[in-house]
């Protein structure tokens, strides 16, 4: 599919010397500094770089959706020959959705939680007067089917919270493609998804560029995805494109020092795994801190369903030694997070038992369970969602101490200062709020808060999946240093097998509620025994098997 009267080689999107800044109390801060970028019909161009490099600001400018305080200071954004930088709001509204589709990063923030899925897909067709309401509703089901969703008629009747992360992302693809746009901007479309779902979604986007000639601007921090999926790669740093060229050339033979630094920071399946904790002098392995025996979790069926709901966790047994990191990997809905919640007694198991430091905690309650909470803490995937936006960094870090009435106000302030220093945050950030921090800094605050009560076990639930490669590497190094320093045990949940290779000594693979394979990381990744583990490894972006 090409533009009428245009040669296939002509760019559909042609950004020339684009300059953007944000107004702050200290004055204007440059965000994009005179970049040039083109995307042709049927081409995938990946824009890669760290958080704050200007990638998403470029996408927002193309859509005419710069946030408050953003100013387009110069340059051109030519779309099919029309300069979007000088287009009025009415013209931009006519292009958004119809000519330019957007696949955003977080479907839970992008989908309306109180509107059925079918209505949200049909709305694009109705707004742009491409179909009346009955026809739009029928077409919505077809679009959900084209996006690869099973039983699309049922999905159309459901709400976002009833779908898995991968299914919600496919809904966003259906919304973005509803009006058959000529350009799709995919802003980190798979960053929070497991590798098999990620691969299916990226395969679907690739098929669209091939079959319909759609141009794709793919914004990602994952260099493996860029290497596998992009025809060309543009690397951004501090608002500038520092290197551009064919994907394989840029990522295999980088010229700019910043590109080389990004590649060095990226986790890799070739990276050596973390060694197991040392054995005692009598050559016995370290004592177990957590032992789970035949855990089962069943949820009641939804109203109107005759068949019982499948088990969320089905007979899982595992152990975590003192000072050890056990990783759990698997698809969305495989039972990883439910298993973790049972281990820390945030969810009661239907059957089975959990032993923590020699004590059966399966039926613990009341004050005993509250005391246990001090010894196990959770670091969540999104620090922005788990940190109070109203509290300062120091107040957030000392919050657990206040909750357990530990120390005086002065004691808590001193402890907060120690923890902020321990997670390598500058003391000058103590008074700032989460919105004033980068993603990596927010995650360090979350880790400091988790350490406040001196726990023995940290459950890290996708703690780096939303971070760029440099921030990922820094957080993983910090977790490794803290483990060596404090003797912590980690249960590390991740969909990124390269991250697991870097942080864990043992790994368990979960599928449909069952632990299908477990063992040392080198053994499981080097010689996977279960077909599903083999499938996961093949699906890793940038892997040799891909």
Image: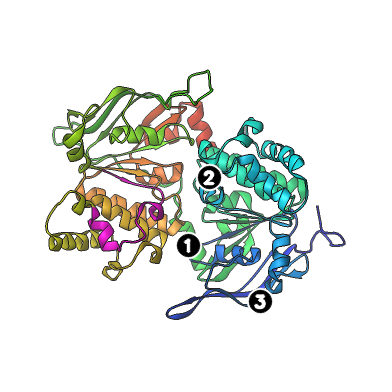
Q: Is residue 319 left or right of residue 407?
A: right
Rounded to the nearest angstrom, the CA distance separating label 3 from label 2 is: 38 Å
Taking depth in this image into account, of 92 and 507 the one nearest to the observer is 92
Q: Quadrant of residue 217?
A: bottom right
Taking depth in this image into account, of 524 and 70 the one nearest to the observer is 70
Q: Is residue 178 left or right of residue 260?
A: right
Q: Residues within 10 Å of mark 1 (few under 14, many from 20)?
A: many
Question: Which of the two discs, 3 and 2, labels the residue nearer the N terminus?
Answer: 3
Q: Nearer the viewer, mark 1 or mark 2?
A: 2
For disc 1, the marked residue is: 51
Rounded to the nearest angstrom, the CA distance separating label 1 from label 3 is: 23 Å
For disc 2, the marked residue is: 113
Q: Position of residue 172 (x, y in %)?
A: 61, 47
Say if residue 531 shows up in the picture: yes
- Of helix, strand and loop, which one carries label 3? strand
Q: Quadrant of the C terminus?
A: top right
Q: Residues within 10 Å of mark 3 (few under 14, many from 20)?
A: some
Q: Position of residue 320 (x, y in %)?
A: 27, 34
Boundaries of the magenta span: 377-399
Rounded to the nearest angstrom, the CA distance separating label 1 from label 2 is: 28 Å
Taking depth in this image into account, of 189 and 303 the one nearest to the observer is 303
Taking depth in this image into account, of 207 and 29 the one nearest to the observer is 29
Say if residue 546 shows up in the picture: no
**Do the residues bearing badges 3 and 2 touch, measured as CB atoms within 8 Å?**
no
Up-down: is 176 above or below 49? above
For disc 3, the marked residue is: 75
Question: Residue 498: which numbered mark, if any?
Answer: none
Q: Position of residue 145 (x, y in %)?
A: 68, 36
Q: Nearer the viewer, mark 3 or mark 2?
A: 2
Please name the residue shown 54% across and 71% down the image: 239
Question: Which of the two discs, 1 and 3, labels the residue nearer the N terminus?
Answer: 1
């Amino acid at each position: 599919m090409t533009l009428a009267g245009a040669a296939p080689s002509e760019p559909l999107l042609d950004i020339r010397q684009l300059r953007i800044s944000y107004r702050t109390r200290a004055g204007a801060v440059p965000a994009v500094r005179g970049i040039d970028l083109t995307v042709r019909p049927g081409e995938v161009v990946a824009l890669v770089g760290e958080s704050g490099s200007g990638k998403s600001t470029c996408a927002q400018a193309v859509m005419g959706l710069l946030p408050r305080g953003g100013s387009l200071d110069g340059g051109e954004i030519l779309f099919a020959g029309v300069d979007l930088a000088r287009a009025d709001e009415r013209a931009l509204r006519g292009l958004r959705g119809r000519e330019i589709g957007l696949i955003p990063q977080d479907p839970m923030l992008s989908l309306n939680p109180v509107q059925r899925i079918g209505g949200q897909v049909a709305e694009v067709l109705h707004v742009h007067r491409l179909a009346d309401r009955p026809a739009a509703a029928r077409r919505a089901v077809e679009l959900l089917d084209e996006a690869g969703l099973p039983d699309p008629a049922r999905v159309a009747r459901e709400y976002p919270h009833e779908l898995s992360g991968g299914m919600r992302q496919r809904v966003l693809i259906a919304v973005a493609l509803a009006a058959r746009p000529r350009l799709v901007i995919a802003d980190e479309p798979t960053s929070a998804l497991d590798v098999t779902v990620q691969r299916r979604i990226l395969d679907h986007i690739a098929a669209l560029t091939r079959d319909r000639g759609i141009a794709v601007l793919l914004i990602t921090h994952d260099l493996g995805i860029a290497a596998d999926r992009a025809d060309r790669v543009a690397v951004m740093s501090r608002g500038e494109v520092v290197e551009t060229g064919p994907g394989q050339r840029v990522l295999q033979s980088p010229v700019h020092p910043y590109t080389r630094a990004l590649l060095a920071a990226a986790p890799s399946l070739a990276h050596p795994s973390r060694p197991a904790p040392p054995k005692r002098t009598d050559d016995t392995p370290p004592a177990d801190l957590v032992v789970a025996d035949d855990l089962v979790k069943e949820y009641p069926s939804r109203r109107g369903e005759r068949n019982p709901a499948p088990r969320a966790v089905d007979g899982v047994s595992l152990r975590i030694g003192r000072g050890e990191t056990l990783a759990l990997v698997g698809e969305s809905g495989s039972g990883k997070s439910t298993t973790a919640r049972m281990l820390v007694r945030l969810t009661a198991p239907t059957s089975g038992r959990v032993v923590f430091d020699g004590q059966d905690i399966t039926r613990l309650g009341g004050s005993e369970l509250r005391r246990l909470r001090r010894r196990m803490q959770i670091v969540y995937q999104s620090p922005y969602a788990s940190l109070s936006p109203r509290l300062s960094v120091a107040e957030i870090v000392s919050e657990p101490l206040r909750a357990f009435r530990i120390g005086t106000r002065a004691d808590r302030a001193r402890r907060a200062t120690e923890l902020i220093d321990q997670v390598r945050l500058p003391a000058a950030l103590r008074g700032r709020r989460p919105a004033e921090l980068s993603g990596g800094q927010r995650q360090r605050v979350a880790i400091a808060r988790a350490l406040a009560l001196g726990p023995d076990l940290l459950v890290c639930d996708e703690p780096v999946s939303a971070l760029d490669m440099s921030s990922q590497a820094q957080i993983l190094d910090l977790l490794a240093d803290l483990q060596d320093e404090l003797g912590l045990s980690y249960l590390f949940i991740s969909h990124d097998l390269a991250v697991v290779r870097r942080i864990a000594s043992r790994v368990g693979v979960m599928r449909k509620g069952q632990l299908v394979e477990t063992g040392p990381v080198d053994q499981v990744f080097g010689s996977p025994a279960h077909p599903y583990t083999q499938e996961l490894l093949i699906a890793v972006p940038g892997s040799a098997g891909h």
